[in-house]
Amino acid sequence: MKKAIYLFIAAVLGISMLAALTSCSDDNRPINVYSDGSSAPLGSGETINIILNGGTGINPTENTKFEDIIATKPTKEGYDFAGWYSDSSFNDYIHPFDITKAQKAKGTAYAKWITVKPSSYLVREGDATITDSGRANQQLDKIGISSNYSIVDLKRAGYTKITVSLSAEVREKDDGYQYIFLYSNTQCASNDISSVMDFYDKYVFGEDSGDPSLLYMHKFEHGSGVLDESWKTVSFEVTLDISRLTSDIYIRYGASGKSDDDWVNRNINVTVIPEK
């Protein structure tokens, strides 16, 4: 008798659990697709409301569930799709592999679009004198890429790299070597130039805790072995892994040599190109 009761209870629980799972995975609400948000209703949860903001590519007959739609990337000519959001202000991102219960219950998704073009920056015009007293003590300049791009949006739109092209006018006050460093934040380890050279690979790839924010180092010799006090242009190009960036890029400078190694730079110009 007890065995029969246990079996009955187990069967009831099993049916209840199956029903709960089915109710979570199935979504039979009507789907409304709007080209823009002007005519879209507020999310009541009774319907699925998709606001494409000028995009195309969502077919309610093919994408029959909220999860199906969130896993789909619409298209819009001249724009990159940067994800679905549950609000028109694009504050509540809907992760395609981790939709929250509240987001699914609301059933509303807004498509976010971004335009991505190369951007140029005049980082600094005036002179800055660089000494060999340690890069942490030198001029700090900022490439303000956050004024044109959101790194988070770029990542969600599928961008994986950023190519940085930098040019600067330089001259020597003393003969020596010159260095230009790119950083992901304003922090800068106080290690001297020789330690950076000794552990260059570890620093660049972030494997050393001494300077994990260092993205790239460019070393050059303006005078090619002799003092050169004339103004000339130095330039380089580097492609950075976007996963190592959070916002802007920062520039530090350094110097090294046998004795005094001061140099001067000005007119720092940078071009940034996001790439997939």
Image (cartoon, grey):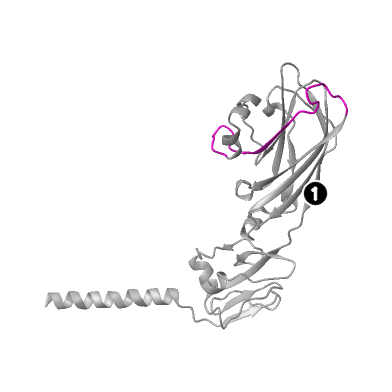
Prevailing secondary structure class for the magenta stretch in the rendered image:
loop
- Is residue 192 among what the camera can see? no
Quadrant position of residue 110: bottom right
What is the three-letter code of the residue carrying label 1?
Ser
The residue lying at 51 percent from left, 67 percent from top is 102
Q: Quadrant of the N terminus?
A: bottom left
Quick one: 95 or 135, which is closer to the camera?
135
Residue 211, percent across and down?
59, 34
**Residue furthest toward the left?**
1
Quarter of the picture holding the C terminus:
bottom right
Side of 99 relative to 139 (left or right): left
Q: Which residue is mark 1?
A: 120
Q: Horizontal and vertical percent for residue 133?
A: 70, 22
Front residue of this view, candidates 163 and 56: 163
Task: Give the residue displayed 61% in from the left and 33% down from the top.
Answer: 200
Count of numbered badges drawn on the protein:
1
Q: On screen, 82 above or below 145? A: below
Could one spot residue 75 in this view of the protein?
yes
Residue range highlighted in magenta: 206-230
Q: Quadrant of residue 227?
A: top right
Q: Estimate how packed mark 1 is, as few (under 14), some (14 to 19) or many (20 or more) residues with alpha carbons within 10 Å.
A: some
Left or right: residue 256 compared with residue 107? right
Question: From the viewer's perspective, is residue 102 above or below residue 123?
Answer: below
Residue furthest to the front: 224
Q: How far across and down, in percent of the image, does residue 103 sit?
A: 53, 68
Which element type, helix, strand or loop, lies under badge 1?
strand
Residue at left 51%, top 71%?
104
